[in-house]
Image (cartoon, rainbow, N blue to C red):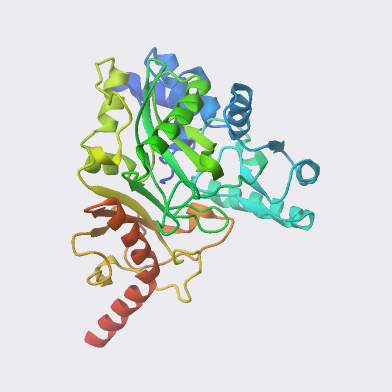
Amino acid sequence: MTPHWETERTGDDLVGLIVEEAERIGADAILTLSEYAVIAVAEAAERLGLRGAGPNAVNSRDKRRMRQVWEDAGVPVPRFRSVDSAADLRKAFRELEAPMLLKHAWGAGAIGQLVLETEADIESAWAQANEAMIRARERGYTEMQVAGADADFLVEEIIQASTESWWDADSGYGDYLSVEGVVAGGVYHPVCITSRIPTIPPFTELSNLAPCALPEAAQREIERVSRAAVDALGLDYCGTHTELKLCPDGKLSVLESAARLGGVMVAAEIEHCFGVDIVGMLTDALLGEPIDPPERMLLDTDATGAAGSLSLIATDSAGRPWTEHPVWDESLVDWTGVVDPGTTVTAVPGLCIPAGTPMPAYDLSTGALGYGGIFMLRAASADTLVADSYHVLDNLEALLAKGHESRRTDA
């Protein structure tokens, strides 16, 4: 996840800036890969008479509105309440079942999320969540179009998710995943599912892995629920990234659905695995060119390899913080004997802190703000990819320390 481009403009001023620049260069289409610019770009496209996500783009950004749209449409979602103050949160806590999750209504990357176990957690959680959003705004991780969005929160019951009835007990996969797709002319085209290893507390994501290795019947049920969720949002032309939780007895609950393509390296993963250029597909749709989406969502049996993005983060795969915070330097890390010989691990340029920068400490309320960057992994199979994701996370601290020690010895 990357912050938005550097500009002081927000709201209508930002939309005006986009329109002005698009007119200056004679743009035939505009799009964004940033969660925080979805509404601004959708409104700019409307002013320009170009294809875009449309007037319902806000349904994909405001999680309070998203939840209500889905609840009304019969899409499975957890019970929730909008909260604007610690007093609101206390009232909601008494109406919902604990534990529950406090989250920012316009957020991404788990920033400002905290689990509430007891009523005694409320005051500190509210203060921590708001402090996290102040830090997020300072670093550019904030909604660009909606005034006052930093103060908008909701609280929801934690979904009773489980990999049981979905994954084998020793699969290594987490209890959630996402469907990547494109909407063109209001018609949803799911392309494939990307899987995950489990999050770390509170719900910070570590990975995005393709292809999904679930049985076809399970993937088709996920496709069905994803379609119901995206269709309910009423979007026109956009990418989609729809996250779902796996529940017992083959049930599902929808977490959220963005009106933009999946972040980090999802597009590259899809192209590596399936040979599908999802960015090009969306661009063609926005330009009014014909597109050739898959007739049905692609499965692991359609893939020719496996690829994933993995967090560069100062914890192991279980969320245990590093004991030290050495400076980051990819050249010091030797993966030999740690990952499969056919697997490549590369720090993604532009998405990682510069070499020589201390690794940021991980904090429960800061989510993606604690990332040092993103790794791209390419492997021969989905099984190898998930195993090597654990190997990277659980060995990185030691490998980096070993590299620093070796460099000092050589000097």
Q: Is residue 77 left or right of residue 118?
A: left
Q: Position of residue 89 (x, y in %)?
A: 75, 44
Residue shown at 22%/59% (left/top)? 343
**Displayed quadrant of residue 21:** top left
**Of residues 105 and 45, the one drawn nearer to the viewer in this rendering:** 105
Q: Position of residue 272 (x, y in %)?
A: 22, 43
The quarter of the picture where residue 251 lies is top right
Q: Nearer the viewer, residue 131 or 248?
A: 248
Question: What residue is shown at x 33% (from left), y 42% (from top)?
Answer: 266
Please say if 77 is above or below 327.
Answer: above
Q: Residue at x 25, y 20 (%)?
A: 291
At a point 39% along the width and 69% down the height, the residue shown is 394
Coordinates of residue 366 in the picture (x, y in percent): 55, 55
Let me know if residue 347 appears in the view. Answer: no
Q: Which residue is farthest top?
A: 49
Please identify the quadrant where the C terminus is shown.
bottom left
